[in-house]
Image (spheres, rainbow, N blue to C red):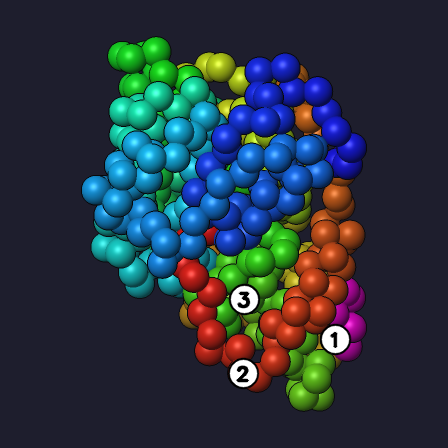
Amino acid sequence: MTGTKVFSQFPFDSRVFVAGHSGLVGSAIVRALGRHGFTNVVVRSRAELDLLDQLAVQRFFAREHIDFVFLVAAKVGGILYNASHQADFLYENLMISANVIKAAADFGVEKLLYTGSSCIYPKLSPQPIAEEALLSGPLEPTNEGYALAKIAGLKLCEKFHSQYGKRFVSVMPTNMYGPNDNFHPDHSHVIPGMMRRFHEAKEQGVRAVTVWGTGQPRREFLYVDDFAEAALVIMDQYEEPTTINVGTGEDVTIRHLAEQMAEVVGFRGEIVFDTSKPDGMMRKVLDVSRVQSLGWKPTVSLTEGLSRAYSWALRNGIFASASLSVEKPSLA
Ligand code: GFB
């Protein structure tokens, strides 16, 4: 994962815009670009550039002469947040995708990489899920809004590729975790949400910790810095209009994750399952043969990744009471 690769189609001095640079995925891509010697990386906070504002996005691209774009800004959240905010997830992700992709097309961006997510595949996709499964069946109801917006963005890239010859590619990552994740107790994904719960239980000497759902769903978890390496390889080498999965190809039950989390955090109490909370998709492990053919594979195991994420959260005071209700910006 370290060291400078040779990127033949992605020069180190290119002007690279990372849309969503401060979130879980965006910050990992900025770290990877730095590791590999890219010297001209452009980032903008939401206050500096509101991606929901089409005119502002057009003006930015007109002015900044961007060569490559990682479009990883999105409104994201875990299963409960998605299920209860479907209009916001649909609208904001549609607008972010449409504004940035259209402006990239209008102002001569050489190549754009767009991120989908494994949860936009059909609920009952054959496992492991191949890229061809997209749109082959009904979506998972808890995140239909988010999924429709991301599918639209992914298809917009594909259509700009076929109609105008634009080098706009999309990737389909599995569930990711790591530094700069959203650790909000209710809006977060399972790993940061569970990590907070186990940490607070340990600190407060609580006897039992509640885990949502039955514990039976299976999830594939990719450490975000591994994803970032894949994103740079795909930006350099992948030119197909159809999307490409990025994951570990291995999944664990939520129960197993909870047991590993207790180990990493040092919680010795009981784990109880709140079956009033939704399980969501029972499984969504990805077929990762296409990305492996590019020579990429993950390097961080789940145990190692959980340990790194927990150390990062402790170093950055994430669990301090003041941050309890602080919601990280919803852009990824
Ligand atoms: O990570 P998560 O919220 O999202 O939930 P999805 C994964 C599984 O973990 C579900 C269970 O079965 C949850 O019920 N779970 C157990 C928990 N404890 C917790 C907890 O404390 N917090 C959370 N959040 N879950 C998401 C989509 O689906 O996948 C997003 O909703 C996104 O749009 C993401 O695409 C990658 O994996 O079910």
Residue at which label 2 appears? 322
User: In the rendered view of the protein, which quadrant contains the N terminus?
Assistant: top right
Residue lying furthest front = 63
Q: Is residue 293 left or right of residue 115?
A: right
Q: Residues within 10 Å of mark 2 (few under 14, many from 20)?
A: few
- Residue 127 in view: no
Residue at which label 3 appears? 183
Mark 1 and mark 2 in contact? Answer it, CB < 8 Å: no
Choose between 264 and 89: the one closer to the eye. Answer: 89
Residue 152, position as x, y percentages in the image: 29, 33
Query: What amino acid does circle 2 point to?
Result: Ala
Mark 1 and mark 3 in contact? Answer it, CB < 8 Å: no
Q: Residue at x 46, y 37 (%)?
A: 17
Residue 133, position as x, y percentages in the image: 42, 26
Spatial CA span between label 1 and label 3 = 18 Å
Q: Main secondary structure of the magenta part?
A: helix
Please report whichever mark, 1 or 2, sits nearer to the chain's N-terminal start. 1
Which is in the foreground here, disc 1 or disc 2? Answer: 2
For residue 198, what is the image quadrant?
bottom right
Task: Write down the region rendered in magenta.
Answer: 261-268
Query: What amino acid does circle 3 point to?
Result: Phe
Say which element carries label 3: loop
Please report whichever mark, 1 or 3, sits nearer to the chain's N-terminal start. 3
Residue at which label 1 appears? 267
Query: What amino acid does circle 1 point to?
Result: Phe
